[in-house]
Image (spheres, rainbow, N blue to C red):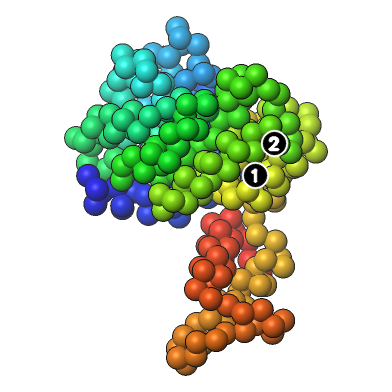
Amino acid sequence: MEQRAVIRNDAIGSADLMAPLFVPADRPDRVQKAGERGARAIIIDLEDAVAPGSKAAARGEIAQILSEHSYEGVYLVRVNSVDDPATFEEDLDALRPVMSAIAALILPKITAADQVRYVETQLADVDDPPALIPTIETARGVREAWDIAAAGPLVHTLLFGPVDLSADLGVAVTADGSEMLTARSTVVLACAAAGIDRPIDGPWPNLDDTTGLRISTQHARHLGFGGKIAIHPGQLATLADEFAPTTAELAWATEVVSVYRESVDAGVGAIRLSDGTFIDPPVAARASSILDAAQRSGRTA
């Protein structure tokens, strides 16, 4: 399992998860249109977006969509909560024939590492298991985020759920995110400590508030998130623009990587940029991550 997990996590790590778009599983027409509207990662939702009476039909729709697998981006699927094991296992049973087409499973309402380990045991017989992205969207989940991030080899990153958490805390979601600063920072730190990818921030819920979306996205990026959920194709351009490296960042990263490599090859210990800034391995690593992000987003210097 662990070796297969490394392979799958490497594969999804090369995908562009800066702006994954949520689409209801019972609306296959929207799944098809999502790619046409520019989504590079589509999350097909079997949980909250699908009414209980429609879930069985939605599973069939997913199987058909994924079996065709004509989309150039990556598919992720949000399954139902493991706290409802019967529904969750029905989801897995329906997805098993097309599991190789799923880059990751989004796990909602995760509050303990054991829930993630339970999912891993359910995938033990899958030859090419998808990565797992647990969602932190309750106060208890935030408290356990460190253990959840390190729960197992299939965990690729964490997803932060501000809407559910706001209900748990009794606060309103704001663009600057000050009401959930501690919770968001905890999720970022948990991912970094576990050595997994930077987390994905949850959606900005007001579709008509582009200014709020931009502020919320800037805030998430500055905190250390690697992407943010879109709930409408109209949000994709703003998310991609805010998360993609800027021209100045690309120029800086390109110079850092070039100078660092030259100095390492020459056996020089003290490395300085043209502006006088000194470079050490962590700075070079950050520069490399910026160039990697640019490559995934298709942005060049």
Residue 248 left/right relative to 256? right
Residue 111 left/right relative to 282? left
**Please, what secondary structure does the residue beneath circle 1 have?**
helix
Residue most extreme to the bottom: 266
Q: Specify whether residue 145 is in view.
A: yes
For the point 65% across and 19% down, the residue is: 170
Of discs 1 and 2, which sits in the foreground?
2
Q: CA distance from mark 1 to mark 2?
A: 8 Å
Quarter of the image holding residue 297? bottom right
Q: Amino acid at mark 1?
A: Ala
Asked whether disc 1 touches disc 2, contact meaning CB atoms under 8 Å apart, the reply is yes
Q: Which mark is residue 77?
A: none
Location of residue 281 in the rendering, given as x and y in whole percent from the top left corner: 50, 73
Residue 121 left/right relative to 17? left
**Please, what secondary structure does the residue beneath circle 2 have?**
loop
Find disc 2 in the rendering and name its residue: 177
Location of residue 10 in the rendering, given as x and y in whole percent from the top left corner: 37, 54
For the point 33% across and 40% down, the residue is: 151
Find disc 1 in the rendering and name its residue: 220
Question: Is 60 rendered above or below residue 277?
Answer: above
Location of residue 244 in the rendering, given as x and y in whole percent from the top left corner: 64, 55
Q: Amino acid at mark 2?
A: Gly
Rate crowding at label 2 as few (under 14), some (14 to 19) or many (20 or more) other CA atoms within 10 Å.
some
For the point 53% across and 81% down, the residue is: 260
Residue most extreme to the left: 125
Q: Quadrant of the N terminus?
A: top left
Question: Is 3 rendered above or below residue 97?
Answer: below
Q: Specify whether residue 33 is in view.
A: no
Location of residue 242 in the rendering, given as x and y in whole percent from the top left corner: 69, 50
Residue most extreme to the top: 53
